[in-house]
Image: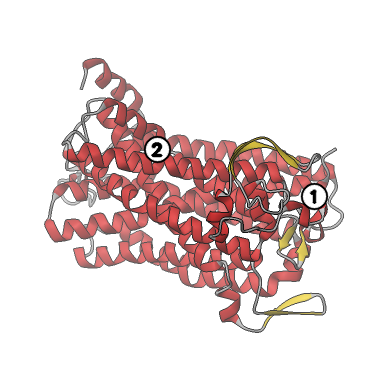
Amino acid sequence: MIDALTLARIQFGFTISFHIVFPALTIGLASYLTVLEGLWLRSQRQAYMDLYHFWSKVFAVAFGMGVVSGLVMAYQFGTNWSNFSRFAGGVTGPLLAYEVLTAFFLEAGFLGVMLFGLKRVGPGLHFMSTAAVAVGTLISATWILASNSWMQTPQGHEIIDGRVVPVDWLRVIWNPSFPYRLAHMVVAAFLATALMVAGSAAWQLLRGRDNEPIRVMFSMALWMVLIAAPIQALIGDQHGLNTLEHQPAKLAAIEGHWENRPGEGVPLVLFGLPDTAAESTRYAVEIPHAGSLLLTHSWQGDIPALKDFPREDRPNVAVVFWTFRLMVGLGFLMIALALWAAWLRWRSRLFMSPAFLRFAVGMGPSGLVAILAGWFTTEMGRQPWVVYGLMRTADAASPRHTTGQMAVTLAIFVAVYLLVFGAGTVYGLRLIAKGPLVHEGDDPVDGGPGEPRQPMRPLSAADEDMPRTLSGELRHGH
């Protein structure tokens, strides 16, 4: 029987999963747009401006859906998790307020100039506006990750009268896991964006739509994957060592490591079926001693095992075990994609290999999937704590919510989210499928004397007859 607490957790997980995807894209796309406009200012190459106009429309859609999903998520702290807000609001409240006062105001102040001001302000001021929006997205990620990281590794506070009171804001913000988690998330956003851009370009190339903007965005995206994917692997390794130090139960669940056997070292479990009841990982495929080498840098080093913790202090081992492997598996595929691209580039066949292009299309959404898998690993691995070591999730929920009430609100959330964000996602995919055009930004937008007036609405970017046009192109082989 599912209780109200479980339904409240499912509801929060459902809403935050939507919210993670769109801000991750805005972080990556804002920086990508800044680079494109900077390259255009330096070289005056039209392809860069064509790509800027195209991807700015996708950015506008992602930004709008990210804002809406964030507002809904924030309200749940008061409705479903009021005890958490009462206990930890002294830390999380100011950090979220700083995010609004710095990042959101910066983004909102320059977003209009970025989207609509290219022909109204000078190129330098417009570039500054795009860069300001990009900086705003990074500042936003910094405050959000500072708040969440404090919940993972809290410090810099005292508990007075049952409430958290910050006593050292530098230690609160710069808590032990914050640098690793911030770097991991920002690089993940860049990777997810690059893979989406590469997948979009590969989709166009497979359908014979081969022009300079498509080639440029394909090449740029694959360079980013080649640089960012190995860096992300190194950051993830350091993050794992930090987790071993501060959240050993989470790491034991990630590794599927139940007990230490003297003299055997810790194996690296590649795959298996964690069995909580039997306290073992069945059908485990292991590499002996590899876990010790990775985590302790010694042949027989031990790490805390799941049996070292009471059952009530362990996370859901099966979920954490598999979401981590999904994230890492996708990471290896990203590196494989980047290396294959480098080899094809060396052979001057980057744009001409159908097998590689199909692989790139398939990898298009992999960055976002990896972000979600990593987030589930992080958040579910922290359980049963909402603030690690200080407050259990069961104590954080609002009192007197019934199972029926939570079930009804969860059903409403699912229906509304699938309708609203489903429509937004379909629209965004249609926009991406349309692809960039040569001289895309040359259409008159000012509506001056003798010129047609074009509505300045990013959501009018995708033509209603786009699927029919695309199908016609496919029939004629264009």
Looking at the picture, how far across and down is residue 228, in whole percent?
Answer: 36, 53
Looking at the picture, how far across and down is residue 226, in whole percent?
Answer: 32, 48
Type of amino acid at the residue the image marks with label 2? Gly
Q: Please name the residue shown 58% across and 72% down the image.
A: 175
Looking at the picture, how far across and down is residue 123, in whole percent?
Answer: 20, 63
Q: Give the residue number, with chain letter if any, for mark 2.
A: 364
> Label 2's element?
loop
Looking at the picture, how far across and down is residue 181, in whole percent?
Answer: 52, 61
2 or 258, which is in the foreground? 258
Contact (CB < 8 A) between labels 2 and 1? no
Q: Distance between the residues labelled 2 and 1?
A: 35 Å
Q: Residues within 10 Å of mark 2 (few under 14, many from 20)?
A: many
Residue 312 visible? The answer is: yes
Q: Residues within 10 Å of mark 1 (few under 14, many from 20)?
A: many
Q: Give the residue number, with chain letter if any, for mark 1.
A: 5
Task: Say left or right for 445 vs 95.
Answer: left
Type of amino acid at the residue the image marks with label 1? Leu
Q: Please name the residue shown 21% across and 18% down the image.
A: 477
